[in-house]
Amino acid sequence: MDENKENLLYFLDNKPYINITNACTNACVFCVRNQKEDVQGAKLWLDKDNITADDVIKQLEINKEKLKNSNEIVFCGYGEPLIKLNEVIEISKYIKENFPDLKIRINTNGHANAIHKKNTLPLLAPYIDSISISLNAQNEEMYNKISNPKINNAYEEVKRFIRACVEEKIPTTATIVSKVENYPVDESRCEIIAKSLGAKFRSREWIKNGY
């Protein structure tokens, strides 16, 4: 396989995103990958899941001039980026060394500490500028319905992860997707929970047909 032909780096409204894995510990009902295999023409389903940091770095180098026009890059694709924790750290080190003005954000489901069975935040904090975490719901019952998690006690793990990010002084936003058909999420209650954990809160409306 030629990894340079994989869309490990893609652009959405001219903002760069890194798509490092298709593996995920959730199967969210609103996930865009359930609706289509591409985002604005970039096919995000990877042929294999043994992508390395060097594979991503090669694509960053190919697009270095375009990256100079951006102010933020986001780890967000068709999977959970922090499953590939070591690769995310290595790529982030490269970005900080070669694109010092490029802020790094991670969009995550908040399962990283449960996946790796340790506090991952001290490893990430030196390199990332912000983190967006999918709170998804106001309680465990709705979270399980909307997220279909593969790990135990996922909702509590997410809340613990949000608090751990805040304690590590990483700018943290807890998010939900609103107006998902047949899944009534209590936006006001979610905002209260997010702020009680020390995080900012953001709600984005479900895009029925994807980007």
Image (cartoon, grey):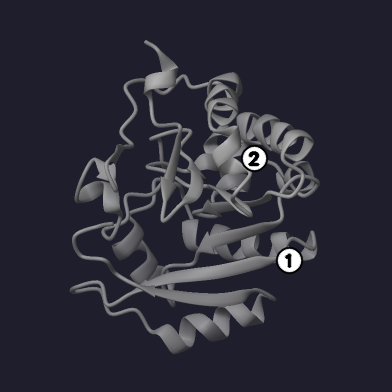
Q: Residue 114: image x %, image y %?
A: 58, 46
Task: Look at mark 1 in the image and give the residue it sits on.
Answer: 166
- In percent of the image, x 59 and y 36: which residue is there? 65
Quadrant housing the C terminus: bottom left
Q: Amino acid at mark 2?
A: Lys
Q: Nearer the viewer, mark 1 or mark 2?
A: 1
Q: Amino acid at mark 1?
A: Val
Task: Examine the rendered structure and indicate whether residue 186 appears above or below residue 132.
Answer: below
Relative to 27, is 196 on the left or the right?
Answer: right
Quadrant assignment, res 42: top left
Q: Residue 156: image x %, image y %?
A: 54, 63
Task: Please tell me whether mark 1 sits on a helix, a strand or a loop.
Answer: helix
- Answer few, some or many: residues within 10 Å of disc 2's Cα (few below 14, many 20 plus, some between 14 and 19): few
- In percent of the image, x 28 and y 53: which residue is there? 32
Residue most extreme to the bottom: 188
- Of 53 and 50, nearer the camera is 53
Relative to 96, is 8 on the left or the right?
Answer: left
Task: Please tell me whether mark 2 sits on a helix, a strand or a loop.
Answer: loop
Distance of label 1 from label 2 (alpha carbons): 19 Å
Quadrant assignment, res 90: top right
Task: Examine the rendered structure and indicate whether residue 116 appears above or below residue 142.
Answer: above
Task: Look at mark 2 in the image and give the residue it sits on.
Answer: 117
Relative to 138, is 181 on the left or the right?
Answer: left
Q: Residue 173: image x %, image y %?
A: 59, 69
Task: Examine the rendered structure and indicate whether residue 196 appears above or below residue 77.
Answer: below
Quadrant assignment, res 89: top right
- In percent of the image, x 56 and y 86: which residue is there? 192
Q: Residue 152: image x %, image y %?
A: 46, 51
